[in-house]
Image (cartoon, rainbow, N blue to C red):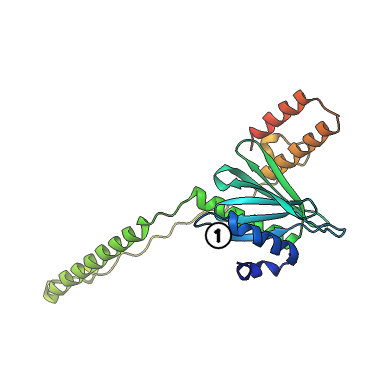
Amino acid sequence: MKEQFKKFLNEEQDPKAIEKITSKLNDLLMRGEEVGYIAVQKKPAITVFPDSIVLTNKRIIICKPKNLGLSMDFTDYTWDDIASTFVKENILGSEFSFGTKTDLAVSIDYIPKIQARKIYTYAKEQLDILKNPVTAAAPAVETVQAEELVEDEIEEVEEIEEVETEEVTSFAEILPAAPVYETYEQIPPQAPAPSGDRKLSELSKEELFDKLQNYKKLLDNGLIMQGEYDAYKKEILSYM
C-alpha cells in the first residue's frame, strides 16, 4: 500500500503525513475506489501535524490529525454532493475550497500552489465525468455504424464498376460542381464595460464565493446580525 502512494511525494508533500494517511486509507477505501491525489498542508511555521486532503474517484476526504497525531478525524464528501470547487492563490500557498449542494462551504488553506492546482484539476475532471458519463454501449454503436458505412462504400464501388464508359456523354456529368465559398464580415470586438460597482449577476462563482466568505467573517466578528447574513447568503447562492 505504501509503495502505491510514493507517487504523491514529488510535489513537496510531507512524507510523514503521507505515511500516516496511507496507513489509515487501507481501511477507508471502498471497493473500486482509487486515490487520485493527496495534498498536504504546509504552513509558514513548522507544522508537526498538518491537515491533508485526499481526492479519490468517488469522494473528497479531509484528514485532520488530533491528540498529538495519535488519532485522526476524517470527513468525506461524495462528488454527487459537491456543487463547485475553487482555488485562491495567496503569497504563502493556496486555499482550496468547495461548496456542497446543501450550501456548505469547506476550505483548507496553506496548500502548496502546485498541489492546489493538481487537486483543482482533478476535482474538475471528476465533476465533468459526473455530468457527462460515458456509457459502455457507445463503442458498440460506433462499431456497428462503421461496419454499415464500409458496406455502403463497397456497394457504391460495385455500382460504379458496372457503369460502361460509352454511356458517359459529357464530362460535366462526372465532374463535381465547384464549391461555393461564403464570405463573412468580421465584426469588431466591443469595448469592455467600464469598471465600477458590479451586480451579483455579473460576478463569477469564485467572486460570489469570496463575497459569501466576507459576510461570514463579518458575522463571526459581530459586525452584522444572523438575519442579515442569512439574507446575504440566500441572495448570493441564488446566482451560484
**Number of marks present in the image shown:** 1
Q: Left or right: where does residue 19 sit relative to residue 138?
A: right
Q: Which residue lies furthest to the top in this view?
A: 227
Q: Is residue 175 above or below residue 44?
A: below
- Judge by depth and name the residue closer to the eye, 199 or 62: 62
Q: Residue at x 53, y 57 (%)?
A: 33
Q: In this view, does 206 lie above or below 17?
A: above
Residue located beneath label 1 in the image: 34
Q: Residue furthest right?
A: 45
Q: Where is residue 139 in the image (x, y as percent from the top left)?
A: 36, 61
Q: Is residue 51 visible?
A: yes
Q: Quadrant of residue 99?
A: top right
Q: Where is residue 155 in the image (x, y as percent from the top left)?
A: 18, 68
Which image quarter is the C terminus in? top right
Q: Which residue is drawn at 51% across and 54% down?
A: 184
Q: Left or right: where does residue 152 sit relative to residue 23?
A: left
Amino acid on which the number 1 mark rests in the picture: Glu
Q: Can residue 188 be seen in this view?
A: no
Callout 1 environment at 10 Å: few (<14), some (14 to 19), or many (20+)? few
Q: Left or right: where does residue 120 sit relative to residue 58?
A: right
Q: In this view, does 31 lie above or below 195?
A: below
Q: Quadrant of residue 160?
A: bottom left
Q: Quadrant of residue 2?
A: bottom right
- Judge by depth and name the residue closer to the eye, 205 or 93: 93
Q: Position of residue 60 (x, y in %)?
A: 62, 51
- Judge by depth and name the residue closer to the eye, 180 or 63: 63
Which element is circle 1 on?
loop
Q: Which residue is drawn at 42% across and 60% down?
A: 181
Q: In this view, does 193 lie above or below 52?
A: above
Which image quarter is the N terminus in? bottom right
